[in-house]
Image (tube, helix red, strand yellow):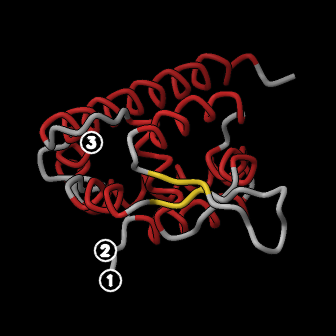
C-alpha cells in the first residue's frame, strides 16, 4: 500500500492530468468546429491512428487503449459519412482493416494537431524552456512507470508519425 503522505499528491496529480486532458480536448473541439467538421475528438483520434497505418478494430483498440465496443459506433459513423472505409484483407478474409478515404484525408488536412491558440501550448510556452524540459522529463518518467517505457515510446512515435504531413 502506498505511503499515506503520497496519497494526496497522487490524487492531485491524477485530477490535474484529467483537467489538462479536458483542456486539450476542448481545444481540439474548437479546431474541429472552426473547420466546420462533423467529427468529434474520438473520431478525429481514429482518423489520426489509421492515417499512416490501416488497422482492424481490435488493433486500433489496442493502439488507442480503448475497448472495441467504444470504438465500433465511432467507426460506423465515420464509415457512414464516407470518411473511412473497411476493406477485406486478401491474406486473411476474417480481417477488415480500416482505411482513410480521400474525403477523410482532406478533413485531416484542415485540422492541425496543435495550434498557437491552444491553451496548453500557450501555458507551456509561458513556463519557459527550463521548466518545460523538467515537466516533460518528469511526465515521461511517470508515464513510463505507469504504462511501460516501451508502450510510451511506441505511442510517442505513432503520435509523431500521425501528425506528419501526407505526401
- Name the front one of labels 3 and 2: 2
Examine the image and state in which quarter residue 35 appears: top left
Give the Cα separation between the discs numbered 1 and 2: 7 Å
Outermost residue toward the right in this view: 1
Residue visible at 32% across and 83% down in the picture: 167
The residue nearer to you, when weighing 20 against 38, is 38
Q: Is mark 2 on a helix, strand or loop?
A: loop
User: x, y percentage for residue 65?
Assistant: 67, 42
Q: Residue 165 carries which label?
A: 2
Residue visible at 67% across and 19% down in the picture: 7
| Dot placed on the residue nearer the N-terminal end, 3 or 1 | 3
Q: Is mark 3 on a helix, strand or loop?
A: helix
Q: Name the residue under label 1.
A: 167
The residue nearer to you, when weighing 56 against 42, is 56
Examine the image and state in which quarter residue 86 appears: bottom right
Is the residue 37 above or below the residue 105 in the image? above
The residue nearer to you, when weighing 121 against 63, is 63
Residue visible at 34% across and 36% down in the picture: 39
Q: What element carries label 1?
A: loop
Give the Cα separation between the discs numbered 3 and 2: 22 Å
Q: In this view, does 154 lie to the left or right of 158?
A: right
- Name the front one of labels 1 and 2: 1
Q: Mark 3 points at which residue?
A: 120
- Name the front one of labels 3 and 1: 1
User: x, y percentage for residue 59?
Assistant: 72, 54
The residue nearer to you, when weighing 140 against 84, is 84
Q: Do the residues labelled 3 and 2 touch (CB within 8 Å)?
A: no
Mark 2, other Cα within 10 Å: few <14 / some 14–19 / many ≥20: few
Q: Is residue 156 left or right of residue 25?
A: right
| Dot placed on the residue nearer the N-terminal end, 3 or 2 | 3
Amino acid at each position: 500500500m502506498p505511503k499515506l503522505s503520497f496519497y494526496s499528491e497522487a490524487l492531485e496529480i491524477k485530477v490535474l492530468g484529467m483537467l489538462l486532458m479536458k483542456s486539450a480536448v476542448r481545444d481540439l473541439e474548437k479546431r474541429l468546429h472552426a473547420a466546420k467538421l462533423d467529427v468529434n475528438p474520438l473520431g478525429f483520434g481514429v482518423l489520426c491512428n489509421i492515417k499512416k497505418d490501416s488497422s482492424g478494430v481490435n488493433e486500433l483498440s489496442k493502439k488507442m487503449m480503448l475497448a472495441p465496443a467504444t470504438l465500433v459506433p465511432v467507426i460506423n459513423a465515420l464509415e457512414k459519412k464516407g470518411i473511412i472505409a473497411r476493406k477485406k484483407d486478401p491474406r486473411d478474409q476474417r480481417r477488415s482493416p480500416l482505411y482513410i478515404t480521400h474525403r477523410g484525408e482532406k478533413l485531416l488536412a484542415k485540422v492541425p494537431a496543435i495550434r498557437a491558440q491552444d491553451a496548453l501550448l500557450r501555458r507551456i510556452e509561458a513556463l519557459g524552456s527550463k521548466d518545460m524540459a523538467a515537466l516533460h522529463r518528469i511526465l515521461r518518467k511517470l508515464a513510463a512507470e505507469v504504462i511501460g517505457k516501451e508502450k510510451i515510446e511506441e505511442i510517442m512515435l505513432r503520435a509523431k508519425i500521425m501528425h506528419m504531413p501526407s505526401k
